[in-house]
């Protein structure tokens, strides 16, 4: 029997008995952590162990540790990073695209070092949206460049660096959020351009389609489906599978974001019906998670993708982390 078709969060830095019992019963495929769950290395390592004990298996544990503004684990206990776009621009001032890509590989490897040490094995990165002048500030400096080929190069370097450190990737936000002028946490962005103009938006995801996991964008693409957000559109999910060619595990962005309408259960049901494999629910609200548990297990196709993703989880490759840190610093000073 497969796991639940959802990824859940927990309320605080410790797992209480009520949550543990719920997770044992609902059996989420994995978990996601936020700043509210993070206090110190020992506490976080204990929490990740407790979460896995609740379901009796090595469940994936996710976090958004992009660096910059979106970084749940912060100094002084963990490394701090520039926003990705700022780092890449700094590295390009010191050298060429290969230098910038090396800095992103090292960034991924150093982030993985922080994550793996506390039992976190999935990072919601790289962000493969192509930055534009109109990109909303909530997203823009989280991007890796303004040209699709540069974004793909930097994204591959970041993903490879994390993989060397035993952490696998969730590329986001498919099929491309860079043209959005609205913060999808607060409203629904609409992209009103022709399909042939979206080719560059799709290109980085196409270049990294072999990555194990992807996350959808809460955004409307008028040229593909003007009626429904991408996360809930079978037409857009079809484009992700067929045009982009991604056959990995596809999860929604946070189902609680205000870009979507209806109850969390209605939002989730529409997303799974459209073809998403997993629903991501982040706020740790037990009542909402209880309603989502009625969604049941992943489909057979989703479970196959999930099993394939799990097979890509590898132990860290040894590295002199101090030398890696020193090289990284030298590339972005």
Image (cartoon, helix red, strand yellow):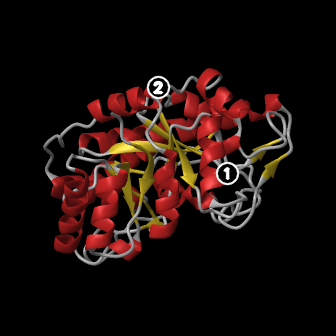
Q: Relative to 85, does residue 214 appear above or below in the rendering?
A: above
Q: Which residue is mark 2?
A: 301
Q: CA distance from mark 1 to mark 2?
A: 23 Å
Q: Which residue is mark 1?
A: 218
Identity of the residue drawn at 18% across and 43% down = 316
Q: Nearer the viewer, residue 10 or 167?
A: 10
Q: Position of residue 151 (x, y in %)?
A: 55, 41
Residue 156 picture quarter: top left
Element class at badge 1: loop
Identity of the residue drawn at 56% across and 52% down = 253
Identity of the residue drawn at 20% across and 73% down = 43
Q: Count residues near mark 1 (Cα–Cα under 10 Å), then give few for <14, some for 14-19, many for 20+.
A: many
Element class at badge 2: helix
Residue 196 shown left or right of residue 67 in the figure = right
Q: Earlier in the sequence, mark 1 or mark 2?
A: 1
Q: Position of residue 81 (x, y in %)?
A: 40, 65
């Amino acid at each position: 029997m497969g796991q639940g078709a959802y990824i859940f969060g927990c309320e605080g830095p410790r797992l209480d008995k009520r949550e543990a019992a719920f997770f044992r019963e609902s059996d989420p495929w994995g978990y996601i952590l936020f700043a509210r769950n993070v206090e110190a290395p020992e506490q976080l390592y204990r929490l990740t162990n407790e979460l896995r004990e609740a379901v009796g298996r090595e469940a994936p544990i996710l976090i958004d540790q992009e660096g910059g503004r979106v970084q749940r684990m912060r100094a002084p206990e963990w490394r701090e990073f520039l926003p990705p776009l700022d780092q890449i621009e700094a590295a390009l001032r010191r050298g060429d695209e290969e230098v910038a890509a090396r800095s992103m590989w090292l960034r991924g490897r150093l982030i993985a070092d922080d994550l793996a040490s506390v039992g976190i094995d999935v990072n919601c990165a790289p962000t493969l949206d192509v930055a534009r002048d109109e990109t909303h500030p909530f997203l823009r400096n989280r991007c890796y460049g303004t040209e699709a080929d540069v974004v793909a190069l930097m994204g591959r370097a970041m993903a490879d660096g994390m993989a060397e450190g035993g952490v696998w990737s969730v590329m986001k936000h498919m099929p491309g959020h860079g043209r959005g002028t609205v913060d999808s946490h607060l409203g629904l962005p609409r992209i009103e351009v022709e399909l042939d103009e979206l080719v560059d938006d799709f290109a980085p995801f196409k270049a990294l389609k072999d990555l194990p996991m992807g996350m959808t964008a809460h955004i409307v693409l008028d040229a593909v489906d003007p009626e429904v957000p991408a996360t809930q559109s079978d037409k857009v999910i079809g484009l992700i599978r067929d045009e982009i060619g991604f056959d990995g595990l596809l999860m929604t962005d946070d189902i609680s974001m205000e870009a979507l309408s209806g109850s969390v259960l209605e939002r989730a049901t529409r997303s799974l019906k459209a073809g998403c494999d997993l629903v991501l629910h982040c706020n740790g609200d037990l009542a909402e998670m209880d309603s989502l548990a009625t969604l049941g297990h992943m489909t057979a196709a989703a479970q196959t993708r999930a099993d394939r993703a799990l097979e890509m989880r590898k132990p860290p490759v040894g590295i002199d982390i101090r030398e890696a840190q020193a090289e990284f610093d030298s590339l972005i000073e």
